Image (tube, rainbow, N blue to C red):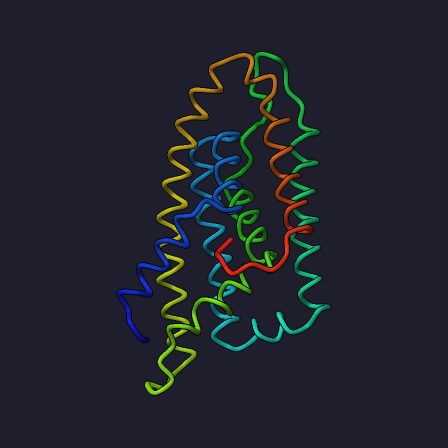
Amino acid sequence: MTNPPLFLLAALVLVAIPGPNHLYITARSIGEGRRAGVASALGVESGMLVHIAAAAAGLSALVAASATAFGFLRYAGAAYLVFLAWRTLRARGGEDAPLLEPRPLRRVYLDGVLVNVLNPKVVLFFLAFLPQFVDQRAGAVPLQIAVMGLVTALIGLTADLVYAFAAGSLGGWLRARPAFRRRQRYATGLIYLGLGAAAVLAGPGGRRA
């Protein structure tokens, strides 16, 4: 790896910038509680491990070079977010009961994994960011990419957990207010719809989603 301090600084800056993953975790934590937010954060970063393995094996470059494969990831990810929106908006509950019932944590975790795995912008991030710090003379390029990817994922998990805990506290305060309780599932569902639309409409980008 060339210039580790610069890599760490760049990774910290890129991961700290709020993105779709943070918005997803925030919505989940506000809507279903802090534990759901933490499970979502763990799921998102578990999905990141799939991208790291793909990048180290050279599969990410193949996906990015294939319009068909990249398009499949793009639309599959958008479709899954739309499904989450539909599932949220059709939830039922009385006015005095939480309108968005917390789901089993295992399901919440798997949702986070799929949301990240089906995000093609993560593929582009690894292709645009990590190779800049690879030391070709040192050899073992796949290992270097894997190590840098794991460091980035660890930084990302830390940031994700900060969002999950902060949003969980905010959600607890909001859920105590009747006006929010009546609108909770609509707000969360619309966030998922917005993320799905962004997945379809946004062009390629070089930052971690």
Query: x, y percentage for residue 195?
Result: 61, 43
- Residue at 49% in and 50% down: 43
Q: Would residue 16 be found to the left or right of residue 126 on screen?
A: left
The residue positioned farthest toward the right in the image shown: 68
**Rendered image quadrant of residue 119:** bottom right
| Depicted 122 relative to depicted 56: above or below | above
The residue positioned farthest toward the left in the image shown: 5
| Depicted 55 relative to depicted 97: above or below | below
Query: x, y percentage for residue 77?
Result: 65, 53
Q: Nearer the viewer, residue 100 or 203?
A: 203
Query: x, y percentage for residue 71?
Result: 70, 62
| Depicted 122 relative to depicted 163: above or below | below
- Number of numbered discs visible in the structure rendering: 0
- Residue at 43% in and 36% down: 35
Q: Nearer the viewer, residue 90 or 14?
A: 14
Q: Would residue 8 be found to the left or right of residue 61 on screen?
A: left
- Residue at 43% in and 32% down: 167
Query: x, y percentage for residue 20?
Result: 53, 46
Q: Nearer the viewer, residue 134 or 103?
A: 134
- Residue at 70% in and 29% down: 90
Q: Quadrant of the N terminus?
A: bottom left
